[in-house]
């Protein structure tokens, strides 16, 4: 039986070194050259504007617009939280990284019973390189891997401690529920984590049924604890939906996936126009024209809808992917919908949905063949799924070797920003940003001063000195983080093959024991499989749903949206390398049989107890 006591020899040394690592990691990420964009109106800047509203205690804005609830509230809330707590964005982000990483080593402490190894694991985890855009863009994808690590930590802790007291289990179960709730607020497509949570909960229930089938009350309580994490989804959905209803009049976490708007888009994606052959065009212009003909309500805004479609098509006949939904939202906002009238807007979509549904039922509209996995996508076919699996395998290899994790030096400063842009970002992030010579001139520092502080009441020299300090610190952090990326890349060339060896040795150990595994071996095997398969699923879902953007498995956008895979693969590799070293020695001893010195055998036994 696995002991869940968090035993640490020399605890003061452990905590001292851990605190040093925490401070260094937070300082490093807080001083990073952030990738800031002042023109990304539907992504970064939109989320930051909503974050400013959140910081002002105005929720997602005091007026309902077509961008207000199009994305979940998680990242704006994080930005607002940093302002409420008077903690700079980079520092709070560093706290998330170091805190979730600590939660992970706490979760696995019954498996890894050596404080040195736990500290090594922690040091490796907090510096794991992740897709540069996902980390350094001030956008919601920055939070996704680390919040998901909290989910993974709590679920693994619950699995590892499945035979512990109910009081200990319920703490981790509640932690899992809260972590899942946090994750659910970050993106509208968070459903990909469900297989992992279901698999862990099901495995726990299966183990409980086997071990406690004769003690029904105990079995029921432990099974309830295993499924309690799912309550986080229900909890956060109702909390956020209630607040949105109070502010805007619609009961939903967002209006992109949970109102009549996505229902209308799902029908538009299904219309067979009889002429479009490009699978990346989910809703063609012809399909829109057919929908306008079938829906009298939609036809009342025909001119603006077709005009907006052409505008968003950017000179092309048809729009690829899900961009057509933005065209429709934009069109309706131009004629008075999405103007602080959420209920009226939703009622419009409801009528259109009912009319299009009737058109499909009567045969006026026909459905395109294929598999529809979401209301937010077009049709998929078996060929798409197969090609996405192949692409995912290639992308998995690239991500395992930390592709696209280099920082970009162009973000050391922001020459294209206006003074207003810099002021906005500095205020929201509570972080001083460097200025170029031209930007300093706009502030009145035109270089007419000397290096001597002759004008004692002037701040010209001091401001230039401060600017140099900020830029110098950013350059230092840039070089440090680049060195870290280089180290991880170098080690991965050895670690990835070693992790495969470790997994093979683990399977060999299972077969040699005729699958009569110890509880610890079973837990480690399932942990590695769970981490690796969830990472692969993350990549597969991103590739399948992003095929209209690119079919290149090494494209940076894959790692940007599948940023959690970097972390999951690294953790799986970490466990597998540990097994390679631990089991490798045992196998060497078996090969050599008795030809091992007592001293060497003692070292081996020490590693086996790690």
Image: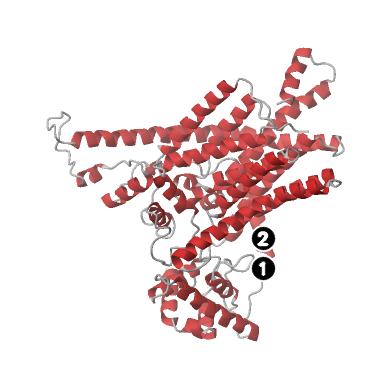
Residue at the limit of the structure toward the front, as seen here: 217
Is mark 1 in CB contact (under 8 Å) with mark 2?
A: yes
Is residue 206 visible to the viewer in this orientation of the structure? no
Q: Mark 2: few, some, or many residues within 10 Å (few <14, many ≥20)?
A: some
- Is 27 in front, or is 159? 159
Element carrying mark 2: helix
- Residue 406 position, x and y percent, is 48, 40
- Residue 281 position, x and y percent, is 54, 69
Residue ID for mark 2: 385
Residue ID for mark 1: 371
Quick check: 286 above or below 258? below
Residue ID at (59%, 23%): 11
Residue ID at (55%, 34%): 488
- Is 365 in front, or is 14? 14
Quick check: 464 above or below 313? above
The image quarter containing residue 350 is bottom right
| Residues at marks 1 and 2, CA–CA distance in whole angstroms | 10 Å
Q: Is residue 565 left or right of residue 224?
A: left
Residue ID at (31%, 41%): 434
Q: Mark 1: few, some, or many residues within 10 Å (few <14, many ≥20)?
A: few
- Residue 247 position, x and y percent, is 44, 64
The image quarter containing residue 208 is top right
Question: Which mark is on residue 330?
Answer: none
């Amino acid at each position: 039986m696995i002991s869940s006591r968090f035993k640490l020899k020399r605890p003061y040394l452990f905590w001292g070194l851990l605190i040093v690592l925490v401070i260094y990691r937070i300082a490093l990420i807080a001083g990073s050259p952030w990738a800031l964009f002042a023109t990304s109106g539907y992504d970064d800047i939109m989320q930051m504007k909503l974050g400013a509203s959140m910081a002002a205690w105005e929720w997602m804005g005091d007026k309902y617009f077509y961008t207000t609830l199009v994305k979940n509230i998680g990242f704006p809330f994080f930005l607002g939280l940093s302002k409420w707590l008077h903690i700079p964005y980079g520092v709070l982000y560093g706290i998330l990284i170091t805190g979730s990483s600590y939660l992970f080593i706490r979760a696995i402490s019954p498996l890894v019973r050596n404080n040195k190894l736990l500290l090594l694991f922690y040091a490796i985890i907090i510096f794991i390189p992740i897709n540069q855009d996902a980390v350094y863009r001030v956008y919601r994808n920055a939070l996704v891997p680390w919040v998901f690590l909290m989910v993974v930590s709590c679920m693994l802790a619950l699995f590892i401690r499945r035979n512990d007291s109910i009081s200990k289990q319920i703490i981790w179960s509640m932690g899992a529920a809260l972590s899942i709730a946090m994750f659910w607020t970050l993106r509208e497509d968070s459903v990909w984590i469900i297989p992992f949570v279901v698999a862990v909960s099901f495995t726990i229930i299966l183990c409980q049924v086997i071990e406690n089938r004769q003690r029904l009350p105990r079995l029921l309580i432990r099974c309830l604890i295993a499924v309690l994490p799912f309550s986080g989804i229900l909890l956060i959905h109702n909390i956020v939906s209630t607040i949105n209803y109070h502010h805007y009049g619609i009961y939903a976490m967002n209006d992109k996936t949970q109102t009549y708007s996505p229902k209308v888009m799902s029908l538009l994606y299904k219309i067979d126009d009889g002429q479009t052959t490009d699978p990346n065009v989910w809703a063609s212009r012809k399909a829109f024209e057919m929908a306008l003909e079938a829906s009298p309500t939609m036809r009342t805004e025909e001119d603006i809808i077709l005009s907006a479609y052409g505008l968003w098509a950017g000179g092309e006949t048809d729009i690829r992917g899900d961009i057509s939904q933005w065209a429709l939202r934009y069109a309706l906002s131009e004629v008075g919908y999405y103007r602080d009238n959420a209920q009226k807007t939703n009622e419009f979509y409801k009528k259109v949905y009912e009319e299009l549904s009737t058109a499909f039922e009567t045969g006026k509209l026909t459905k395109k063949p294929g598999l529809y996995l979401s209301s937010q996508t077009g049709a998929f076919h078996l060929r798409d799924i197969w090609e996405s699996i192949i692409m995912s395998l290639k992308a998995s290899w690239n991500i395992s070797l930390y592709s696209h994790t280099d920082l970009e030096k162009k973000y050391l400063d922001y020459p294209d920003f206006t003074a207003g842009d810099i002021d906005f970002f500095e205020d929201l992030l509570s972080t001083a940003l460097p200025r170029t010579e031209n930007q300093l001139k706009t502030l009145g520092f035109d270089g007419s001063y000397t290096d001597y502080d002759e004008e004692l009441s002037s701040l010209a020299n001091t401001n230039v000195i401060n600017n140099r300090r900020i830029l110098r610190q950013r350059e230092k952090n840039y070089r440090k983080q680049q060195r870290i990326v280089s180290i991880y890349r170098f080690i991965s060339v050895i670690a990835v093959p070693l992790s495969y060896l470790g997994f093979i040795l683990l399977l060999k150990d299972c077969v040699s024991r005729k699958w009569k595994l110890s509880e610890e071996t079973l837990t480690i095997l399932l942990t590695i499989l769970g981490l690796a398969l969830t990472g692969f699923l993350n990549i597969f879902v991103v590739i399948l749903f992003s095929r209209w953007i690119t079919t290149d498995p090494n494209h940076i956008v894959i790692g940007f949206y599948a940023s959690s895979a970097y972390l999951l693969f690294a953790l799986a590799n970490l466990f597998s390398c540990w097994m390679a070293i631990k089991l490798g020695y045992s196998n060497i001893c078996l090969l050599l049989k008795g030809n091992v010195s007592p001293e060497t055998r003692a070292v081996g036994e020490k590693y086996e107890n790690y």
